[in-house]
Image: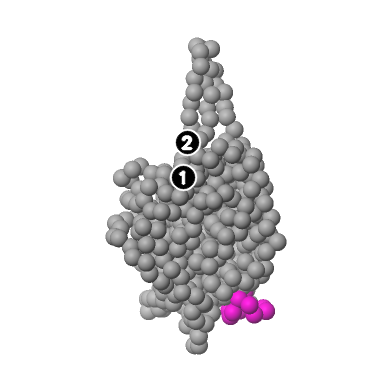
């Protein structure tokens, strides 16, 4: 990730439902990036010295204020990236409402340990790394920052925060709210496109927390290698759903449709590849199409809309190209598959079947509202092979009445999180991990929060 000297510049923040300009955003210059890091560096020692309990108290106050203003934040999310406003409210509620649990986990992560040996007693404590660069995506404009900022801050680090250039106002509003409670320069906001992110990564930071694309994650890793900066990278996925012949087809179809289409398919752990046993393929296909028909698209402020627009013209074009290639390659369109006319970057719920294995839609992340149906023999080994035929490894889902079979499949699939007869969402406290090229390190959980610290061992004579 190479950088050049950045000059002050502006970029448009666009409403994806209309294409209209919401605001012109000023991107940071190289000098402003360096200044942001320096300010965070200067504030870090005093912030760490406050101690965990005081830091947690301030972060919980910020979360409570965010919950009180959830509708205000939700409306901004909908305007900037398009998701239905009720979904945006749930996003704010879910992450802000989980702050108490996050603080309990961080407290456990920071708890010192005492180890005894033959001739010494060792105390293992955890210290903050220093300054964390947090770079977050546009698909959950409040949720993803709240995956990185609270554990980074609660463990005693200061943070320079760059939200996605597609949701700059949501990031700005969140930073402003949190800074109502935090000491000066503990959380410093900068705005900008990828070149600003590259400048931040290359700057005098001690750790980078990033949620976004695999390609950008690799570039960040390369840039960070010069000083061996600590990394947490949560990247993309091409998650499979495997449906065996004995599965509850209605439940499996519900999972397929909801988790392929929610947030207009713009979720890193969307269901992107579905493999159905031959014996139930026709029935399953009918169920999926019928359920997908209910997913009306439109403005996120309209009643009855389940899918808003895609976040940008570029993202929609990526989906269009994959679908058109599939159609040209013989795929059968069971629903949707054509861009609607009019303003905004809308794309309809689309269901494809009879997909040739070599098609890019089977291998490259789609990140759009497309359901792909492929058949397999129902054989366990074939199911594992198909599920693992990807460089990604974020999540997977398996449906079968044979729970032992489901467990065997889950253990063989190379993914960080697997759901059996349910979507892959895990119980509170579980880490969110990307296997293979879906991530480096992980976020959430006691162990995940420890990654924002470094252990120090102090030994005494016994």
Residue 289 is one of the magenta-drawn residues: no
Residue 286, percent from left and from top: 59, 74
Label 1 crowd bin: few (<14), some (14–19), many (20+), radius 10 Å: some
- The secondary element bearing badge 1 is classed as helix
Q: Residue at x 66, y 50 (%)?
A: 60
Q: Does residue 433 sit above or below 66 in this rendering? A: above
Residue reaching furthest to the bottom: 342
Q: Nearer the viewer, mark 2 or mark 1?
A: 1
Dot 1 corresponds to which residue? 42
> For this rendering, which residue is in front, 440 or 423?
440
Q: Residue at x 57, y 49 (%)?
A: 183
Magenta segment boundaries in residue numbering: 296-307
The answer to which image quadrant residue 112 occupies is: top right
Label 2 crowd bin: few (<14), some (14–19), many (20+), radius 10 Å: few
Determine which of the numbered discs, if any, sits on residue 199 in the image: none
Q: Residue at x 58, y 69 (%)?
A: 77
Q: Quadrant of the N terminus?
A: bottom left
Residue 243, percent from left and from top: 56, 60
Residue 404, percent from left and from top: 59, 46
> For this rendering, which residue is in front, 80 or 429?
80
Residue 364, percent from left and from top: 40, 64
> For this rendering, which residue is in front, 154 or 18?
154
Q: Is residue 184 visible?
A: yes
Dot 2 corresponds to which residue? 454
């Amino acid at each position: 990730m190479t950088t050049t000297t950045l000059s002050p510049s502006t970029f448009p923040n666009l409403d994806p439902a209309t294409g209209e300009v919401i605001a012109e955003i000023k991107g940071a210059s190289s000098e402003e990036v360096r200044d942001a890091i320096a300010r965070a560096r200067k504030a870090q020692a005093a912030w760490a010295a406050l101690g965990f309990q005081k830091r947690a108290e301030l972060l919980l106050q910020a979360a409570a204020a965010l919950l009180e203003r959830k509708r205000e934040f939700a409306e901004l999310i909908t305007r900037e990236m398009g998701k239905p406003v009720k979904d945006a409210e749930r996003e704010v509620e879910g992450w802000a409402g989980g702050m108490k649990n996050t603080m309990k986990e961080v407290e456990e992560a920071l708890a010192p340990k005492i180890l005894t040996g033959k001739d010494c007693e060792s105390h293992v404590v955890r210290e903050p790394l220093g300054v964390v660069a947090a770079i977050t995506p546009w698909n959950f404009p409040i949720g993803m920052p709240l995956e990185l900022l609270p554990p980074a801050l609660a463990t005693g680090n200061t943070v320079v925060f760059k939200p996605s250039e597609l949701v700059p106002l949501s990031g700005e509003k969140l930073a402003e709210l949190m800074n109502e409670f935090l000491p000066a320069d503990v959380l410093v906001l900068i705005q900008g496109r990828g070149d600003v992110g590259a400048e931040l990564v290359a700057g005098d930071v001690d750790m980078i927390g990033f949620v976004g694309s695999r390609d950008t994650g690799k570039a960040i890793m390369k840039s960070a290698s010069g000083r061996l900066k600590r990394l947490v990278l949560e990247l993309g996925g091409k998650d499979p759903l495997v449906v065996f012949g004995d599965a509850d087809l209605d439940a499996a179809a519900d999972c397929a449709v909801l988790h392929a289409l929610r947030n207009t398919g713009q979720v890193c752990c969307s269901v992107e590849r579905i493999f159905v046993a031959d014996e139930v393929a026709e029935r399953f296909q009918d169920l999926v199409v019928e359920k997908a028909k209910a997913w009306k698209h439109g403005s996120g402020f309209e009643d009855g809309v389940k899918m808003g627009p895609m976040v940008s013209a570029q993202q929609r074009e990526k989906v269009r190209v994959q679908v058109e290639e599939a159609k040209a390659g013989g795929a059968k369109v069971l629903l949707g598959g054509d861009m609607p006319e009019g303003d905004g970057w809308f794309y309809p719920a689309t269901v494809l079947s009879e997909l040739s294995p070599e098609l890019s839609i089977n291998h490259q992340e789609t990140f759009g509202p497309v359901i792909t149906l492929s058949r397999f023999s129902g054989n366990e080994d074939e199911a594992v092979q198909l599920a693992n035929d990807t460089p990604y490894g974020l999540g997977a889902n398996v449906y079968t009445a044979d729970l032992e079979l489901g467990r065997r499949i889950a253990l063989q699939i190379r993914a960080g999180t697997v759901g059996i007869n349910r979507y892959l969402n895990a119980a509170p406290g579980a880490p969110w991990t990307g296997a293979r090229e879906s991530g480096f390190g992980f976020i959430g959980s006691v162990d995940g929060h420890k990654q924002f610290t470094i252990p120090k061992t102090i030994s005494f004579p016994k």
